[in-house]
Image (cartoon, rainbow, N blue to C red):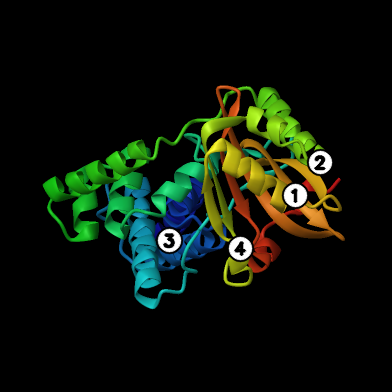
Amino acid sequence: MTESDWLAEGFEENRTRLRAVAYRMLGSLAEADDAVQEAWLRASRSDPSGVDSLGAWLTTIVARVCLNVLRSRRTRREEPMGVRVPDPVIARTEGMNPEDEALLADSVGLALLVVLETLTPAERLAFVLHDMFDLPFDEIAPMVGRSPATARQLASRARRRVRGAEVQAPDPDIGRQREVVDAFYAAARRGDLDALVAVLDPDVVMRCDGGTARPDLSVVVRGAAAVARQGLRFHQPSALVRPALVNGAAGVVATMGGQPIAVIGITVSRGKIVAIDVIADPERLLRLDLAVLDD
């Protein structure tokens, strides 16, 4: 086997892990795929002969690519201002394919990705690589141009931010999650405000991302009563609401006239809805792979 063949084979063996790193770093499926492709181009132009661990080496390459993307976002301000809900991974209610399961290992829900969006690029890299992928700080430090001690501090600050946001893990029983989500939409169809409030956690948060095309829809609402009222305002009786798995948890895809109008991730914890994350940006909805829900 030639060195180039060995590198290509090793890259394919690590592709799923590299995509998982990029998704957590960027919160965008398309950008994650682009980052993995760029990582391959960089790796193929490098000399891996002195590499002890191919997986770790490739991880650092894709992480550097993602760091550059995050920094350029801030410089060019290409991302829409205001509410930003990351790209969801959508699957049929019967379950995810193995690739998506690997992508979402460690319960990477939309609520956690939303918090990661608030970190600085360096904090996000340190937290993702250390806390999620177990890279040591002496390998992380050169990527951010800091000492290992400073890299540790970056991860610590990020960890405090994540903990402070009180991101709650969804209940493990998907069937129970679905019952709560179905109760929420049944109440919305009836226009029953009290029934909506009953399935919401008192501290529930709803985030809706309308993008640059629908800034009127971008909103963050907190508290059961306020979220219930917002839910009634957003509910469209003529829309078809299809159950789906959104980042491995019970969610829905709403369509009208065969076109998607919203993808909604719902976090159910201890039998109550604690977070509702909505993508209503028409441009982004068209880029999502919703064909997985077709019969």
Rendered image: mark on residue 235? 1
- Three-letter amino acid code of the residue under disc 2: Arg
Alpha-carbon span between mark 4 and mark 3: 45 Å
In the image, what residue type sits under mark 1? His
Mark 3 falls on what kind of element?
helix
Residue that badge 2 annotates: 189
Q: Which residue is mark 4?
A: 210
The CA distance from mark 2 to mark 3 is: 59 Å
Find residue 13 and name its label.
none
Secondary structure of residue under mark 4:
loop
Measuring 50% from the left and 43% from the top, which residue is drawn there?
111
Give the image location of residue 189, x and y in percent.
81, 41
N-term mark: 2 or 4: 2
Which circle's residue, 1 or 3, is located before the other in the chain? Answer: 3
Looking at the image, do the residues carrying marks 2 and 4 touch, with CB atoms under 8 Å apart? no
Q: Are marks 1 and 2 in contact (CB under 8 Å)?
A: yes
In the visual, does 156 lie left or right of 255? Answer: left
Res 99 quadrant in image: top right
Please give the label number shown on residue 4: 3
Q: Is residue 257 left or right of residue 187?
A: right
